[in-house]
Image (cartoon, helix red, strand yellow):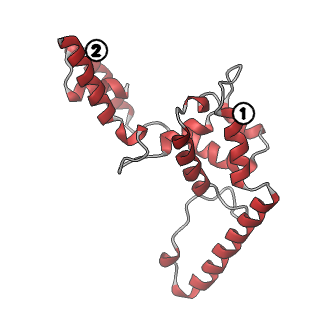
Amino acid sequence: DEGAQLARSLAAEISQRFNWILNAAAPNFDPTYLISTLLDPNVAWMVENDVKVTVGKRFILAMIPSPNDNPTTSISSPPVSMLPSSSQFSALAEVMAIKRAHQEMEKRGDGPAKLLDRYLNEWTSKPPPTSIDPFEFWYQNDLEQISYLALEILSIPATTAPVERVFSQSGLCTLDRKCRTGPKLLEAECMI
């Protein structure tokens, strides 16, 4: 039947378009959406399987700043190879000290991995009873090592498209072309 075929085609097209967000095994996977979903206590429970939670946890742990870092600095720092050669040994020593600090915190049970496990166990199992403001949640939470990252990730706009482009796409969707199912219109509809 043509209706079922159309539905399958649309489902396949949507899956292909969002593969870079939904499929953690995709070569062009962008973990930003998975991480922001896991760090929002309102929607963390919607992550549908343990594999995605594990992948998200791995990305979150890789992004958490070390306890020695200044929280006002950016999460990413220049790679050691880009530093002047005279400071490479000091940079290596600093990296080793940070790694040791993380390992000791993990042994004591208050490291980022343990705190993240505690958060994920609580918030990915069931929806919250009431809506929670994620920014207030992370400001008031005792998971300070994760809080800075959560606030930084959740404050990133979902798109960096200029406002004019958004209005242009809205106009495209509301014109007489809205009944078409071409890739450009599908992309515009999904973006809005």
Residue placed at 56% from the left, 83% from the top?
Answer: 88
| Quadrant occupied by the C terminus | top left
Left or right of 37 on screen, residue 164: left
Residue 174 image label: 2
Q: x, y (%) of residue 82?
A: 48, 76
Residue 71 vertical placement versus 82 (above, below): above
Q: Earlier in the sequence, mark 2 or mark 1?
A: 1
Q: Is residue 156 visible?
A: no
- Which residue does the numbered mark 1 point to in the structure image? 136
Q: Quadrant of the N terminus?
A: top left
**Relative depth, front residue between 135 and 8:** 8
Q: Nearer the viewer, residue 146 or 53?
A: 53
Amino acid type at image mark 2 = Thr
Residue found at x 44% / y 45%? 24
State the residue in front, 167 or 2.
Answer: 2
Q: Secondary structure at mark 1?
A: helix
Residue 155 image offset from top left, x and y in percent: 57, 40
- Give the amino acid at mark 1: Glu
Q: Is residue 24 visible?
A: yes
Left or right: where does residue 35 sit relative to residue 16? Answer: right
